[in-house]
Structure formats: C-alpha cells, structure tokens
Amino acid sequence: MTSATDADRATAAPSASATLSHSRRWLVLAVVALAQLVVVLDATIVNIALPTAQADLGFGNDDRQWIVTAYALAFGSLLLVGGRLGDLFGRRKLFLIGLVGFAVASAVGGAAEGFGLLVTARAAQGVFGAMLAPAALSLLTVTFTDGRERGRAFAIFGAISGGGGAIGLILGGALTEYLSWRWCLYVNVPIVVIAVIGAALFLPRAETREQGAPRLDVPGTVLSVAGLVSLVYGLGTAETDGWTSATTLGFIAAGIVLLVAFVLVENRVAHPLLPMRVVLDRTRGAAYLAVAVMGAGMFGVFLFLTYFMSSVLGFAPLTTGLAFLPMIISLMISAQIAPNVVNRVGYRIPVAVGFLVGAAGLLVFVGLGVDSGYWTHVFPGLVVVGLGLGFAVAPAFGAATLGVDSTDAGVASAAVNTFQQIGGSIATAVLSALAAAAATDALVGVDPSNPAALLEASVSSYTTVFAWSAGILAAGAVLCGLLFRHGAVEQDPNAAPVIAH
C-alpha cells in the first residue's frame, strides 16, 4: 500500500497539474508518447543497422558492441540525475532540451564517417535521452490525476514503451533495406520536430518547475553515476572478456560497492537525489521490480528471436521487423484492457497474470527447431507474449509513480527507466553468456565445420535463452504477486490514486 505520508503529500501539496489545461491533457499525452517512442526506438532500431554500418565504416566485431553500449552507459547512468533536474529546473524545459539535443546527436551520428564520431553521437543520444525519458513520464504523472483517466493514459504510454522496441525493428529493417543504415539515426529528426512543435503548442508554460523542490544532491549524483556506469560497463564486457575476467568482476564489484554507498548517503543527506521513500514504498517498489523483470524478459524476445528469424528462417531485415507485428498488436490490445482490471482488483493480479502469460509464450519458443515455420511456431508465441506483457506493462508504469510527492515526480519517473535499463543490461550479459555456453555444449563431439551442426547449435542457444527468459518472467510473477497488495484503486479527482486496504 502507498504510505499515508506519501499519499498525504500527494493530496495536500499544490500539484503542478492543477495549472494544466484540462482540455489539453490528451494532447499532452500525444506529445509525451511521441517523445517516448523516440527513446525506445533507439534501443533496437540501430541493432539491425549494425552489420551495414560496420561494413560501411570498417570497424571490427569487438568495436561493434560499443555502438549499443555507449548509448546504454550514458542513458542508464544519468537517468536519476535527469529526473531530478526536471524537478529542479522544470520538466517542460528539460523535455525540450532533451528533444532538441537528441535530434542533433542523431543527425551527427547519421552523418558520421568514422567509428569514433558514431560512438560519441550514440553517447550523446544517451545523455539527452536521460533528460527526455523521465521528463516525459513525470509530465504524464502530474497531468493525469483522475484514477480512470490516469490508467488509460499509462496504458497507452506503457504500450508504446513495450512495443516500441518491435517498432524499431520494423522501421530499422525498412530503412536499412531501402535507404541506408544512416536513416536509422536520421529518422529521429523529423519525429522530434513534430514533438517539439507539439510541446510548444500544448505543454502549458505554467508547468515549469516544482516550487520547493530540493537542490541537487552532488554526492549522490557522483555515486549513482559512477556506480551505474561501472555496473553497466562490467556487464557489457562479460560477453567479450568472460565472467571470470578481472575487468568484468572488477567493474561489477565496484559498481555494487558504489551503489551501496549511494544508498547509505541517500539516507543521510538532507536533499537526496533519490529519496528512499520513493523506492521503499511497497507499491512503487513492486512496480520497479516489475519494470526490471520486463526489461530482462523483453531482451530475450527481441534479440534472440531476431537471430532465429534471420539465420534459420532466412528473413530479410524488413521481414524480420514485420514478423513482430502480431506481438505489437496483441500487446496494445491487452494494455488497453489492463486499466479496467486494475480499477477493479488493483495491481497484483494483472501484473502477475501478465508475466505468467508472457512466460507461457516464451515456452512456446523453447520448442523451436531448424525446421520450424513462422506461422506454426513463431506466430502463436508472439501473440501470447504480447498479450501477457501488455497486461503487465501498463499497470507497472502506472504504479511506479503512484501517490508520489509532486516534487519527486521527476526522479520517481527516472527510477522507472533506470530499473528497466538495469534489467535489460543484466539480461544482455547473463543471457548472452548462457547462449554462448549452450552453443559450445551443442558442438561437443560434432564437426564444427558442418553448417547443419552449426545451425543446430545456434538454435540450441536461442531456445536456452527462451527457457531462461520464461523463468525470469515466472519468477517476476511470483515476486510481484507477493509484493503488490490486492485491492481496487481508489478514485480521487484531486490526487493520484492509491491502493485500498
């Protein structure tokens, strides 16, 4: 249950949403959703373009991962800081700065003629994305305070967050196949232009900053950034250097120590970067866990199923992206149904059931083989996974900022993206290592020069990942079922909804 202290603050504090034009709230949602789409697109759209970009710019396989890691490092480590800056200096201002900066970085990356500039541009995208993402979610949080409308708004936002990765695969495949890999970066520019125009027209200027918001916590900022960079970097090197290498273990250990120090500092400073009341609230804590589990589970679907469809089914980039459409459609449908269930029974049932359904869909993929077909084996699993994740994603995003003090809306929103990023980063390292081990085991006693044996080994590695991903979602269902309290969401027109006893 959301604590009485948080709930009282949410009700008593003069919310910035009070100044927002009620008639423009759905237009605000459209602008915020468009900005969120830009952020989540870039998590996958560049992946399909990597082989072409590598051939064009001439960098090696060891360097290729840094096109992805540079973005993840900057984005994941600066999210909390970006969220707090929005609370301090104004969410609208940070939202616009993030949009414009993201577009400029995308244009520079698209025009890059060398590996160094491309990596730098990707890192810059991460920096501005860390401003943009929490500002977008916190704007949504303070705009929609009516319980039923808030649930619907977060359902739309959650569907975009959950399905944006698959949309990125479709768009990336089309742009790479018919234009150039550079358009996977250039495409952000026109989208951002539309979002900036919408923000200028529809985001009320009165929502500039929260009065009484605390100053920036410098020690907490340094520890959080250093800890998250170290942890994400260490996890990123595990695939190339191995889990037992000094680099991998050293950076992971340093990251854990720095983050523990961050928690200790946050409990002592007067104006913490991430107030522990935000995370330790039972409802929000469960929501952050759910978002992390979702980030981990979605990784297995997108990355390794992409490998399967391209290497086994022989799909071209665009066809591979389009093959994910059933998941997007089913995810969006179930995300729209979820708020009605939340209003009746609370968060526990839809999140737990959603994860269990998603796990069942992943188990369908465990049965894939070299002779499996798309419509008979892949399509059914995609539909089931989409239904499950859509049922969980909307409630999780809504609960993550439930009842939070308006002065903490930015950093609470940033924590959502941070946990999702950490979940995805951990999954990237762990599942990639499990896949490599499974492929190695499958080749024991087999002629490694035999193409059929290599294909069998690859499929074995993919199905191993799907099995572990199903286990992650199932474990998430159990944990969220235990942490979320059962009970319908109370409707209060003057405050964010809270969970009833």
Image (spheres, rainbow, N blue to C red):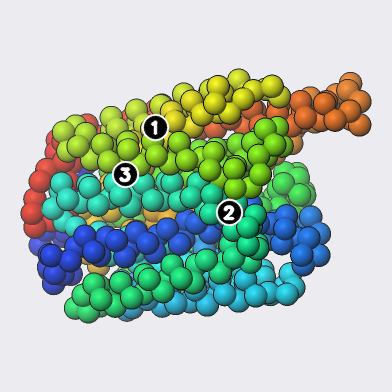
Question: Camera-side residue: 123 or 166?
Answer: 166
Proximity of marks 1 and 2: CB atoms separated by less than 8 Å:
no
Q: Residue at x 29, y 61 (%)?
A: 30
Question: Could you say whether the residue bearing mark 2 is in a helix, strand or loop?
Answer: helix
Say which quarter of the image contains residue 460.
top right
Residue 434 shows in the view: no
- Disc ID at residue 388: 1
In the picture, measured across the screen, residue 266 lies left or right of residue 140, that is right
In the picture, measured across the screen, residue 394 lies left or right of residue 305, that is left
| Kind of residue sitting beneath label 2 | Ala
User: What residue is disc 2 on?
Assistant: 174
Q: Residue at x 54, y 38 (%)?
A: 323
Disc 1 to disc 3, C-alpha distance: 11 Å
2 or 3: tag closer to the N-terminus? 2
Q: How many numbered callouts?
A: 3
User: What residue is disc 3 on?
Assistant: 394
Disc 1 to disc 2, C-alpha distance: 27 Å
On the rendered image, what quadrant is the C terminus found in?
A: top left
Whether 413 is drawn above or below 85: the answer is above
View extreme (front): residue:
178
Q: Residue at x 56, y 69 (%)?
A: 186
| Kind of residue sitting beneath label 3 | Ala
